[in-house]
Amino acid sequence: EAGVAQSPRYKIIEKRQSVAFWCNPISGHATLYWYQQILGQGPKLLIQFQNNGVVDDSQLPKDRFSAERLKGVDSTLKIQPAKLEDSAVYLCASSFFGSSETQYFGPGTRLLVL
Amino acid sequence: AQSVTQLGSHVSVSEGALVLLRCNYSSSVPPYLFWYVQYPNQGLQLLLKYTTGATLVKGINGFEAEFKKSETSFHLTKPSAHMSDAAEYFCAVSPSGGYNKLIFGAGTRLAVHP
């Protein structure tokens, strides 16, 4: 079974530029998550989708971050404009629907903002 | 609000020694509890989880954890460390019922030396 796919794996941009990350979840998983992991910290949930609807985006900086999940499958996360403090690893995860279901994580995209 | 505390950001053990990684949570009701492992430049992989039932949970690679409600703890143990266990370990909680948002601790980096 294929895992969660993410691209690109690495990205270096200058501040005020824009960037987009892509995630393809495990087939059949209704729930998709984007986490931000800053160096030395645990992952923090940015946004959670149930199919193509948003169920939690309380920690998403909506003035610069946006995310969509078209057709309830793939998802993109965008940052515009980027700030230095956005340097982090962005992890995508997916799971079947249900509160006890295991989340499966992709390898992440490492973003460096200069 | 729920939170997770992992005591010790770095733990070092000898190969063959007991591994003990500590995790305490704060929650008004017993949550679901998870341990994830992260190897360098990889995503997170589930080691084990507790939802309901038996409080001693066995996971992959010889790890186990015990849910102690009275102590609000979910410590991770392994009787005998192996060099391949060197990684970062994250404890996470999820509210029981509803959508399974994960709240992670800051992580514990485990070093195993010969």
Image (cartoon, rainbow, N blue to C red):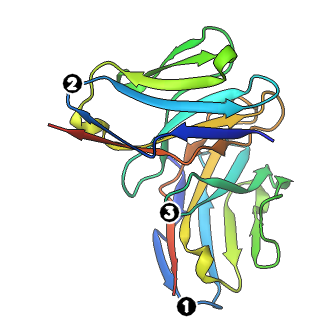
Where is residue A6 shown, x and y percent of the image?
53, 62
The residue under the point 24% across, 31% down is B82
In the image, A1 versus B65, the foreground residue is: B65
Q: Hey, which quadrant is residue B91 in on the image? A: top right
Q: As drawn, is B100 to the left or to the right of A21?
A: right
| Tag shown at residue B6 | none
The residue under the point 83% across, 58% down is A58
Q: Nearer the viewer, mark 1 or mark 3?
A: 3
Say what amino acid the circle numbered 3 marks.
Leu
Q: As drawn, is A99 to the left or to the right of A104?
A: right
Q: Determine whether label 3 and label 2 are within 8 Å by CB.
A: no
Q: Which residue is mark 3?
A: A39
The residue under the point 60% across, 61% down is A23
Furthest residue toward left: B114
Number of numbered discs on residues: 3
Q: Is residue B88 above or below residue A77?
A: above
Where is residue B98 shown, x and y percent of the image?
84, 33
| Tag shown at residue B16 | 2
Q: Are marks 3 and 2 on the same chain?
A: no
Q: Is residue B32 above or below residue B111?
A: above
The residue under the point 46% across, 68% down is A9
Q: Which residue is mark 1?
A: A14
Say what amino acid the circle numbered 1 marks.
Glu
Q: Residues within 10 Å of mark 1 (few under 14, many from 20)?
A: some
